[in-house]
Image (cartoon, helix red, strand yellow):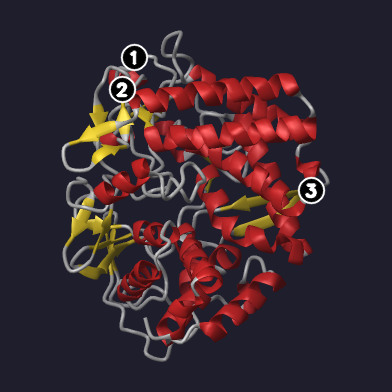
Amino acid sequence: MRRRDFIKTTGLLSTGMVITGSQAVASTLFNKEFTSQRPAVSDRNFTSEAVEKVIKKVAKKIVDPELRWMFENCYPNTLDTTIEFTKKNGRPDTFVITGDIPAMWLRDSTAQVWPYLPLANDDKNLKTMIKGLVNRQADCIQLDPYANSFEKDETVMSKWSKTDHTDMKPGTHERKWEIDSLCYAVRLANGYWKTTGDASIFDENWQKSAKLILKTFKEQQRKDGVGPYTFFRTTSKHEDTLANWGAGASIKPCGLIVSSFRPSDDSTVFPFLIPSNYFAVASLNQLVDIYTNVIGDTSFAKECADLAEEVKAALAKYAVKDHLDYGKMIPFEVDGYGNQYCMDDANVPSLLALPYLDCIDADDPLYVATRKFVWSEDNPYFFKGKFEGIGGPHVGLDYVWPMSIIQKGLTSNDAEEIKWCLSKLKETHAGTGFMHESFHKDNPEKFTRSWFAWANTLFGELVFKTYQEYPEVLKSKI
């Protein structure tokens, strides 16, 4: 479904919506009747019986009518609007756009379908669709392991090919090297196998992509110089390009892996991005499990294990900050020379989201101290006004990302804190019934991206988790 069709179907853009640069300023009237904002059944891209059953089951337990309405709109949004499922050479093939950008990010596509994975065994079509995404991601990685996003048509040259000075190939949408892109592909394949028991995804084609993942991680340790990847964009926005004519800021090789860009698609200040290095350790250990217990290639499993241990040891040495107010905590970026940048960004992986990605225990003292820091005004990208939360340079100052509030809830074991997160999300959707990329800390009607499927589905995941683990939260008005 094209963006204009989605807007027409849902009525998301009212006459009071004005697009100014990257910001959408909404004066949408509050929908008192809570009319469904989902596309008509005939206009939905993909339908899952299991997902529809969950929507009905959970909705019955949500006392708050507005929260219930938001869940019903958001949880199925990825399926309703972004899935393009077909077969390619007799194999399932799934392309997942982000929403208002008709390209597929490895990160976003994994995150968008992740909340549906627990239902895969209850719905054959859903299972096949997710399998198709595993297949498509393997193909994308083989096309270019350094690319973060891809075109549906592998013969198309991206619009960025006119401004980006890098080895741009047909079929790649954007070639920003981000560790997490490859990690998310491993996370999806491993999660699919663990959930369904279906190891057929680990075929020869998938194994080629796994070998490229390890090769790319090692190249980006940069022990032998800059390596094969450089990126320079003709732009006025410095977050969209790299210093040193595309090599990025200087680093001292120390065992960590360079990530030229963050999950926000903004360039790093110090190239060793710590949340993504934590994510890489988790992904490498998942590859060890797969290659040991499914594929039976103990030699490759050992390579993955050795790299995981090396990165883990480097994190312990270089990625601990003795903060004056918070004690030992985790910095956001380092350079290997001893410089550390303390902040957090709303995009995932983030420091806040590390337990969500199975990178650290939520009760680990190092994480507890870090969590206190990132959700405070000592974090340069924590914004507090009428509302509060974490943002990032991608949108700019004073704009909170709902994703940060959702992650605060998903990584919490406190029912009251989860209820607080749900209440703030309910107060900041600007009457649309959907999550946005960001909103102004004092005025939620100033928001960016009216169609951002990852945030929508992630919100649905938080509500579903609350239903499963803290049902009492949903038994009263939020």
Q: Secondary structure at mark 3?
A: loop
Amino acid type, mark 2: Asp
Which of the two discs, 2 and 1, labels the residue nearer the N terminus?
1
366 lies left or right of 125: left
Mark 1 crowd level (few <14, some 14–19, many ≥20, 10 Å Cα): some
Amino acid type, mark 3: Asp
Q: Position of residue 461 (x, y in %)?
A: 52, 64
Q: Is residue 116 above or below residue 321?
A: below
Amino acid type, mark 1: Lys
The mark found on residue 198 in the picture is 3
Cα separation between marks 2 and 1: 6 Å
Q: Position of residue 83 (x, y in %)?
A: 62, 59
Q: Quadrant of the N terminus?
A: bottom right
- Give the labeled residue for mark 1: 252
The mark found on residue 335 in the picture is 2
Q: Is residue 243 above or below residue 276?
A: above
194 lies left or right of 14: right
